Amino acid sequence: MKKKIFTLKVCLFIFISSYSQKKEICGQIEYKFTTNIAYKYIENYTLTFNNKKSFCKEKNVEKESSKKNQEEKDEGLQQNFIVGRKNITRKYYYDTRKDFYVKDNYLDEILIFKEKPLKGAWELHTETKKLSNFLCKKATINFRGRNYTVWYTTEIPVPFGPWKLRGLPGLILEFYDTDRVFHVLANHVKVGIDNCTISVDEKELKKAMSMNSYLDKKEELIDKMFAEMSAKRPKGTKPFKRDKSCEDCSKGIEIFNEKN
């Protein structure tokens, strides 16, 4: 008798699990990306998701002029040159569960590349909090030189999120690194909307470069920018020199010790 009851429970569990996996779920979420490197910079994204994939695209993009600011350091005032933006082509992050693509706008050049699998293990915690009326659980991970705290909700059981963090048993609604250099927060969540169709330019994805090629291209663009800035300096003045080993210089969101 006990064996029959156990078998019935197992079958019931398999049926419920199978049903929940087949159940369609989709929605749209608005996110605010806040970056604080040398100065505070805010971007807005819309993430559309369904059971199979997610597409997080930049919105409300405007042109920005380059500018300078200064900050107090131990050795005195440091001048920062903040590159503006003329190309308003929108950036995006596209996750198919199997593959992950990024469309970046770096120094006004559009770069599309295929991301490597997310390295590092998620550590799940018992802490919870409410975000946009969803109960969220805490997880942490070290990703490319930074320690991140992530809040995700299993009430939306898809492994997606904004930016590059992914693979949890629920949708990510907030995350930030230890130093609060990068903070992403959902400010509007709509689940079960009528149209959750996700379409991308497949021809564009076929041209995606590798991560290593992307990093090499970024270095090339930075060197080109320094050369152009030096060419505009008055005659007789020294050209700008890029110090790649600068320890006091502001680091990017992702800190690559190796090309991974």
Image (cartoon, rainbow, N blue to C red):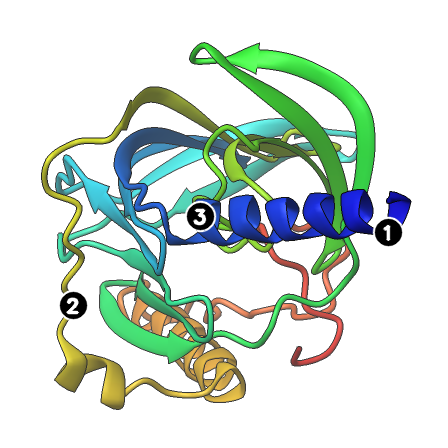
49 vs 152, left or right, is left
Mark closer to the chain start, 1 or 2: 1
Type of amino acid under label 3:
Tyr
Q: Which residue is mark 2?
A: 200
The part of the image, by quadrant, that contains residue 105 is bottom left
Residue 246: x percent and y percent? 72, 60
Q: CA distance from mark 3 to mark 2?
A: 29 Å
Seen at 66% across and 51% down, the residue is 249
Pinpoint residue 166: horizontal percent, then vertical percent: 55, 53
Instruction: Compare marks 3 and 2 and give the one earlier in the sequence.
Output: 3
Where, quadrant-wise, is the C terminus in this rendering? bottom right
Badge 1, how many Cα within 10 Å: few under 14, some, many 20+?
Answer: few
Q: Mark 3–mark 2 contact, CB under 8 Å?
A: no
- Find residue 3 and name its label: 1
* Kind of residue indicated by mark 2: Val
Q: Nearer the viewer, residue 135 or 216?
A: 135
The residue lying at 41 percent from left, 70 percent from top is 226
SS under mark 1: helix
Q: Nearer the viewer, mark 3 or mark 1?
A: 1
- At horizontal 50% and vertical 28% (from top left) the residue drawn is 155
Classify 10 Å Cα crowding around label 2: few (below 14), some (14-19), many (20 and above): few
Task: Give the farthest residue toward the right.
Answer: 2
* In the depicted structure, whether residue 157 falls above or below residue 101: above
Residue under the image location 14 percent in, 63 percent down: 199
> Residue 19 — which label?
3
Task: Choose the circle earlier in sequence order: 3 or 1.
Answer: 1
Q: Position of residue 181 (x, y in %)?
A: 61, 35
